Amino acid sequence: MDRVTNASLRCVAGSHKWEKLVLSTKWLNKECFYRSKKDFITVPDRDLEKMEILEWDMELGDAVAFDFKKLHGARGNTSNERRRAFSLRLVGDDVRYIEGGEQTSPPFPNHGMISGDKLREDWFPIIFSN
């Protein structure tokens, strides 16, 4: 929504192919989303691991699409310029809710779904169908 040159989205090349997902943390306080950490790895040290970081300046109207498995984030905006973004998460129309015992990101409290249910269309509207 704004031109961004100093705090744009950053992605770790190839991270969507790692054996385990990276343990998600809340960006406001770095608190962990999940109680059970056994199925995840902690965020690696990018310098120690010599990870390739992909980052691009963004112009008004640009869009980025990527797999949620991709390790991603952005530096804080330390400039006097605003940095507005619009985030949209898309899933297929065949997706089912599965109770995993953990909080979702973002959280959806009191959704009323049980394992196996199709996602609620009033919460997850269908925007395209074949």
Image: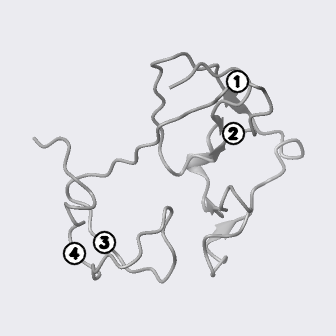
Percent x, y of residue 53: 72, 33
Percent x, y of residue 128: 17, 41
Vertical comparison of 34 with 70: above or below = below
- The kind of residue tagged 1 is Glu
Percent x, y of residue 37: 67, 76
Looking at the picture, tell me which residue is in the foreground, 111 or 66: 111
Whole-number angstrom distance, CA of label 4 to CA of label 2:
34 Å
Vertical comparison of 105 with 56: above or below = below
Identify the mark nearer the N-term, 3 or 2.
2
Q: Which marked residue is nearer to the observer: mark 1 or mark 4? A: 1
Whole-number angstrom distance, CA of label 3 to CA of label 2:
29 Å
Residue contact between numbered discs 2 and 1, judged by CB atoms under 8 Å: no
Vertical comparison of 22 with 12: above or below = below
Q: Which residue is label 3 attached to?
A: 97
Whole-number angstrom distance, CA of label 2 to CA of label 1:
15 Å
Outermost residue toward the top in this view: 59
Identify the mark nearer the N-term, 4 or 2.
2
**Disc 2 element:** loop
Q: Which residue is label 4 attached to?
A: 117
- The kind of residue tagged 3 is Tyr
Residue 74 badge: 2
Whole-number angstrom distance, CA of label 3 to CA of label 4:
5 Å
Q: Which residue is label 1 attached to?
A: 81
- Tell me if mark 4 has few (under 14), some (14-19) or many (20+) residues whose alpha carbon lies within 10 angstroms of its own: few
Q: Which marked residue is nearer to the observer: mark 2 or mark 1? A: 1
**Disc 3 element:** loop
Residue contact between numbered discs 3 and 4, judged by CB atoms under 8 Å: yes
Q: Is residue 124 left or right of residue 44?
A: left
Identify the mark nearer the N-term, 3 or 1.
1
- Tell me if mark 3 has few (under 14), some (14-19) or many (20+) residues whose alpha carbon lies within 10 angstroms of its own: few
- The kind of residue tagged 2 is Ala
**Disc 1 element:** loop
